[in-house]
Amino acid sequence: MNSLSCFVKPAPSAQRGMTNAMAPAGSGQAGGVPLITSAVAERLADTMFALSTPSRVLILGSLLDGPRSVSELTEALGMEQSAVSHQLRVLREHELVRAEKVGRTRLYALYDQHVSILLQAGVDHVNRALPAAAALGRRRAASRRDSGGAS
């Protein structure tokens, strides 16, 4: 049983060998059963909130290579120690990072492999959208030039 199984209702298609991920794209349902319950939606939105600050995403990105101390993160990211500590507290509260004491040092690591998968999916999504966003920007700039700068 995975950690989300208590939140996600299994779709009837799962009984026939299909997984929830195989439900028709865009339907949000499989056989009339919502794939995302209100409880899951709330937890997911809360997780997305934790990812809504670039400094927190940068910290998570730094932890992809393995556990680090606050001082290592501070040096790697060029952030103040107090800012790194504050962002780590938020990430811990949202179960995106975990801390382990090694001697007198506290090392921070990604909570589990799901966090690295989530980060990679986000990066893939943003990178996929970059060419479309650049083309839209060029079209808008050309439109402004053609209309004499008025919007």
Image: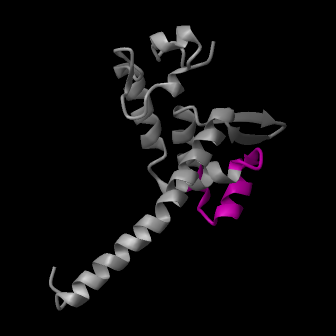
Question: Coloured how?
Answer: one colour
Q: Residue at x 44, y 41 (%)?
A: 48
Toward the right, the furthest residue is: 103
On the question of residue 10 being in view, the answer is: no
Vertical relation: 21 (above or below) 51: above
Vertical relation: 100 (above or below) 128: above
Of residues 143 and 24, the one drawn nearer to the viewer in this rendering = 24
- Inspect the magenta stretch and tell me whether residue 20 lies in it: no
Quarter of the image that includes the C terminus: bottom left
Query: Could you tell me residue 59's position as x and y percent?
Result: 62, 52
On the question of residue 140 being in view, the answer is: yes
The quarter of the picture where residue 149 lies is: bottom left
Of residues 15 and 41, the one drawn nearer to the viewer in this rendering = 15
Vertical relation: 64 (above or below) 75: above
Of residues 76 and 70, the one drawn nearer to the viewer in this rendering = 76
Quarter of the image that includes the N terminus: top right
Q: Which residue is drawn at 72% across and 55% down?
A: 71
The quarter of the picture where residue 5 lies is: top right
Number of marks: 0
Quick check: 5 left or right of 52? right
Query: Could you tell me residue 75's position as x and y percent?
Result: 70, 63
Query: Could you tell me residue 46's position as x and y percent?
Result: 42, 34
Quick check: 69 left or right of 81? right
- Inspect the magenta stretch and tell me whether residue 82 lies in it: yes
Query: Could you tell me residue 42's position as x and y percent?
Result: 37, 27
Vertical relation: 79 (above or below) 89: below
Q: Which residue is drawn at 21% across and 89% down?
A: 146
Per the rendered image, the range of residues in magenta is 63-84
Quick check: 23 left or right of 104? left
